[in-house]
Image (cartoon, rainbow, N blue to C red):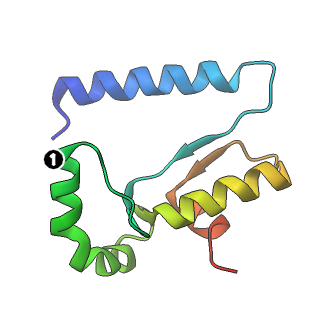
Amino acid sequence: GTGKGGVMWAGVKGEAGNYVLGLPVRSYMFRPGFIQPLKGVRSKTAIYQALYNVLAPISPLLQRLFPGAVTTTVAVGRAMVRVVREAPEQRIFETRDIQRLGAGD
């Protein structure tokens, strides 16, 4: 589980997000769940890279089973570019939003 540390970290992230959204500049929050690295992307954190290596063969299955929790580095990048270009009113993007915005051309 997340335990006390996870709950505290979630609170800090929430406070930081609210602060950024309250700034007098247009800002957006991306809140993806699990991000499957594609196109040679590798984590510099060894334990994360080990986890990615183990999950790589089943990542497409995980994405189908949990579409609201799994996305890819490609989808995140495309979604970010699209948000900058289109400047939508929506300011917080969860995994499903990222998937929709980052869908292939």
Above or below, comparing residue 104 to residue 7 in the picture? below
Q: Residues within 10 Å of mark 1 (few under 14, many from 20)?
A: few
Name the residue rendered at 38%, 66% in the picture.
40
Percent position (x, y) of residue 7? 28, 27
Above or below, comparing residue 37 to residue 2 in the picture? below
Name the residue rendered at 56%, 27% in the picture.
17
Name the residue rendered at 36%, 70% in the picture.
66
Q: Report the side of 62 relative to 101 (left or right).
A: left
Q: Report the side of 32 relative to 89 (left or right).
A: left
Q: Report the side of 58 relative to 84 (left or right).
A: left
Name the quadrant containing residue 92: top right
Percent position (x, y) of residue 13? 44, 27
SS of the residue under disc 1: helix
Three-letter residue code for mark 1: Ile
**Which quarter of the image is occupied by the N terminus?**
top left
Q: Report the side of 98 relative to 8 (left or right).
A: right
**Which quarter of the image is occupied by the C terminus?**
bottom right
Percent position (x, y) of residue 97? 61, 60
Name the quadrant containing residue 91: top right
Residue at the spot of label 1: 47
Above or below, comparing residue 66 to residue 48 in the picture? below
Q: Which residue sits furthest front?
A: 40
Question: Total marks drawn?
Answer: 1
Percent position (x, y) of residue 25? 80, 25
Above or below, comparing residue 22 to residue 10 in the picture? above
Name the quadrant containing residue 3: top left
Name the residue rendered at 22%, 79% in the picture.
57
